Amino acid sequence: MSKDQNRSLLELLYQVSREVATAIDLRTVLQRVLYAALNNVGGERGSIIVMDAHGKPLDSIIVHGKQIQGDTTRQLRVTVERGLAGWVLRNQRPALVSDTSRDKRWLRNPDNVARKSEAKSALCVPLMAREKIVGVLTLVHSEPNAFENKHLDLMQAIADQTGIAVLNARLYTESQRQARVMTALADGAATINASLKIEDVFQRILNQAMQALQVETVALALEEPDSGDFVFRAATGNHAGSILGKRVPKGKGLIAKVVKDKQGIVVPSLKDENPFVKPQ
């Protein structure tokens, strides 16, 4: 690398570092890192997957052209399990794929295969911070052989410069979430002490839980002593009207699994499992 090239690289990394250092919100940091990679390395679309402390997908972002796609974490979960990003995460090594149609690590899209349009090129690098992997950054070009080793080196340099910013933003987001939960717990305790009407207590607690967890819907089902069925006694959010009063038969659905195992569960996609099993 010549002196001019080295100077240009240092200037770029300094600029990228300044851009991400001024943000603490995780989504903002992810957007800035991804746009920096797309604008300076190249590619037509890209993604970042952020991992939590247990190595599970926590958040993500996909950019196609200049458009940010929403609600992508579930979509990218399969990529983590079986795709190129998953290989990079497991091996903690960067990857340059000149032709995705010839690389087994690339997760094949059935639609692309049918149209014989799968051949692309891709770069994928780990985001590291404090010697631990915090995420993975991927860029894709619609044409094969669009990337070379110099592109991979530049992308890895950007990843190395921004990994700690992603970690700090993740920790900040987690601390904010914990603060909201603690506030909801305190408010819930105050609600219980302030009201004798159980329906009001349920509704207020659910409202506080929805705000703390930042979800669309929260519902509470209680077991009927005689039948063993669970009936939704309170609900709030977008789908509250269709849930309230619904009955889940004894031993059915996700409720039965939670009761049996005596622990909560996380369902990545409700398309794969109905939580109510056609409630009555």
Image: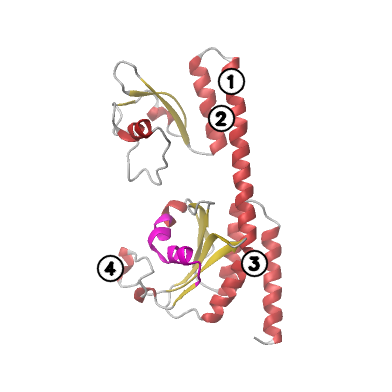
Q: In this view, does 227 lie to the left or right of 11?
A: left
Return the disc, 1 or 3, that comes first in the chain's sequence.
3
Label 3 with label 2: CB-CB less than 8 Å? no
Q: Which amino acid does label 2 sit on?
A: Gln
Q: Which amino acid does label 4 sit on?
A: Ala
Q: Name the residue under label 1.
A: 191
Q: Identify which residue, 108 or 53, lies in the foreground.
A: 53
Return the disc, 3 or 4, that comes first in the chain's sequence.
4
Q: What residue type is labelled 3?
A: Gln
Label 1 with label 3: CB-CB less than 8 Å? no
Report the span colored magenta.
Answer: 77-94
Q: Mark 3 points at which residue?
A: 161
Q: Residue at x 40, y 64 (%)?
A: 83
Q: Identify which residue, 141 or 277, lies in the foreground.
A: 277
Badge 4 crowding class, 10 Å Cα cut-off, few under 14, some 14 to 19, many 20 or more, is few
Q: Where is residue 137 in the image (x, y as percent from the top left)?
A: 52, 65
How many angstroms separate mark 3 from mark 2 (CA)? 38 Å
Q: Position of residue 32 (x, y in %)?
A: 62, 61
Depicted 100 relative to depicted 2: above or below:
above
Depth check, mark 4 against mark 1: the one in front is: 1
| Secondary structure found at label 4 | helix
Label 4 with label 1: CB-CB less than 8 Å? no
Q: What residue type is labelled 1?
A: Thr
